[in-house]
């Protein structure tokens, strides 16, 4: 491969396979219709919270109550852990297919809690590398798109409908997951006109002992000649079309089954099918014709989801429901199949498990100031709640929570194509089963050098 170095934007062939890139993309080398690409950004964040409930990522976890040590005191964090690097090869062999292999890493890998196995200096200054994306992608000239590897979940058509916030995604009520999968997409129509896409995905089972993969499916309509400027916090400004998307997910969960006498002497199991649906929209309220003329553009993004057993798509959500017993007659002596928290619980005295019900919605506006100002503002609200968490814990389980909410406002400015800065105010609230509430106020200032 040639060692010639390019400082140009990605070519048309690369752009066709550029989904998932966090920032600007540079072609490092090119030969024989093969391109080596490099992308990413260096991010610096200053975060102040009014409580000690959160690390950098807000997610759907609970805010500590007033009257507790964590709820009565604040926290300030300086972090670079959301910085990213991405590497890929793009091919166009002229046989009707374009190919892509891509790996993206960040520094938000698994770490024990500070003071529980790791020092503060180690946590912030020597973070663990994490895989965000690792996949192959093949796209045909007639609209087929094949993806195999770790990529955005098809449920919710991620990440096309994620609200843009200076704070680390996700906030409450936002579908946000990258997972190993095999996905097939088919698009009818041109990208600059009305087009329709259907997709089917087999992805990592939320419980490996269930012996069945997750199954996701989706339909999406886009009106390509009606667009508004929209950008993720670290991404390029794009002219996003009007989009309406439907998607659903189905997954199996397995737990021990009691014998007729109520004991668990035999290795019997019972499976239940969890499922959920999502509706997503992107609506240009004030439209533009192209991304490099984004001034005075306004876009509305919104999402609604409802179902059971999809806590993995809502980062941090558990409701504080322990998925094994919760004071019920659930089997203490049986070797339980692994299952993460937040998917199931047991009603008092019950031997059969109950799926956790979830419902979410979020909506945001993004307005780009007049051309030449290179600035934009976003504002929105998001919420996750459950109507049966209160039934799935001990009667005195005041740590159970039923609702997570967040409202946010952002101002961002591009000083150049590479240098960006942003300011956010975020208000978050948790409602517990005893009807008490806990709140957190977050102010965040961030900078990015995008390459």
Image: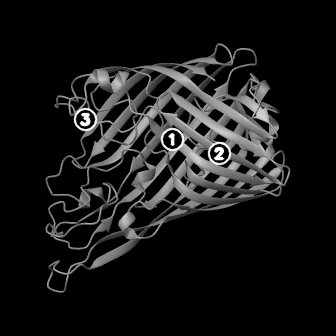
Q: Is residue 441 visible?
A: yes
Sequence order check, earlier mark of 3 and 1: 3
Provide residue 246's location: percent of width, then percent of height: 62, 58
- The answer to whether residue 377 is left or right of residue 94 is left
Label 2 SS: strand
Residue 433, given in percent of the width and then of the height, sits at: 24, 50
**Badge 2: few (under 14), some or many (20 or more) residues near its Cα, within 10 Å?**
some
The image position of residue 160, as x and y in percent, is 62, 44
Identify the residue under disc 2: 101
Q: CA distance from mark 1 to mark 2?
A: 14 Å
Q: Which residue is mark 3?
A: 64
The residue where tag 1 is placed is 132
Report the residue at 58% width, 44% height from top: 159
- In this view, the residue in front, 278 or 144, is 144
Please, what secondary structure does the residue beneath circle 3 have?
loop
Q: Are marks 3 and 1 in contact (CB under 8 Å)?
A: no
Write the residue at 47% across / 41% down: 382
Q: Nearer the viewer, mark 3 or mark 2?
A: 2
In this picture, is 139 found above or below 198? above
- Which residue is depicted at the point 34% across and 70% down? 254
Residue 204 or residue 54, whichever sits in front? 204
Quadrant in the picture for the C terminus: top right
- 377, 236: nearer the viewer: 236
Left or right for 360, reference 241: left
Q: Earlier in the sequence, mark 1 or mark 2?
A: 2
Image quadrant in which you'd find residue 355 = bottom left
């Amino acid at each position: 491969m040639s060692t010639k170095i390019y400082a140009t934007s990605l070519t048309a062939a690369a752009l066709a396979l550029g989904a998932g890139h966090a920032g600007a993309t540079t072609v490092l080398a090119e030969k024989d219709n093969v391109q080596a690409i490099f992308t990413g950004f260096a991010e610096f964040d200053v975060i102040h919270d009014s409580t000690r409930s959160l690390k950098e990522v807000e997610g759907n976890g609970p805010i500590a109550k007033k009257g507790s040590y964590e709820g009565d005191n604040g926290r300030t964090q300086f972090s670079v852990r959301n910085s990213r690097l991405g590497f890929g090869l793009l091919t166009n062999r002229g046989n009707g297919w374009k190919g892509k292999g891509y790996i993206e890493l960040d520094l938000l890998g698994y770490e024990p809690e500070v003071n529980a196995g790791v020092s503060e200096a180690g946590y912030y200054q020597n973070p663990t590398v994490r895989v965000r994306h690792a996949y192959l992608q093949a796209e045909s000239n007639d609209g087929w798109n094949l993806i195999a590897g770790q990529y955005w979940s098809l449920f919710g058509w991620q990440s096309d409908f994620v609200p843009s916030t200076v704070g680390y995604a996700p906030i409450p009520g936002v579908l946000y997951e990258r997972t190993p999968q095999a996905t097939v997409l088919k698009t009818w129509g041109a990208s600059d006109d009305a087009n329709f896409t259907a997709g089917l995905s087999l992805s990592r089972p939320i419980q490996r002992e269930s012996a069945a993969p997750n199954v996701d499916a989706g339909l999406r309509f886009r009106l390509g000649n009606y667009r508004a400027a929209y950008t993720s916090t670290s991404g390029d400004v794009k002219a996003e079309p009007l989009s309406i998307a439907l998607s659903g997910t189905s997954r199996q969960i397995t737990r021990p089954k009691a014998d007729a006498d109520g004991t668990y002497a035999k290795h019997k199991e019972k499976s239940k099918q969890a499922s959920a649906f999502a509706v997503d929209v992107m609506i240009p309220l004030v439209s533009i014709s192209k991304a490099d003329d984004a001034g005075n553009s306004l876009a509305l993004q919104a999402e609604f989801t409802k179902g059971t057993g999809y806590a993995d798509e809502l980062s941090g959500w558990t409701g504080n429901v322990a998925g094994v017993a919760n004071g019920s007659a659930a089997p203490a002596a049986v070797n339980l199949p692994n299952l993460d928290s937040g998917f199931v619980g047991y009603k008092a005295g019950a031997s059969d498990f109950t799926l956790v019900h979830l419902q979410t919605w979020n909506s945001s506006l993004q307005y780009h100031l007049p051309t030449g100002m290179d600035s934009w503002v976003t504002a929105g609200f998001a919420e996750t709640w459950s109507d049966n968490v209160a039934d799935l814990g001990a009667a005195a389980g005041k740590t159970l929570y039923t609702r997570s909410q967040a409202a946010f406002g952002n101002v961002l400015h591009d000083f150049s194509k590479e240098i960006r800065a942003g300011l956010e105010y975020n208000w978050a609230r948790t409602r517990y089963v005893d009807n008490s509430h806990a709140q957190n106020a977050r102010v965040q200032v961030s900078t990015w050098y995008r390459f």
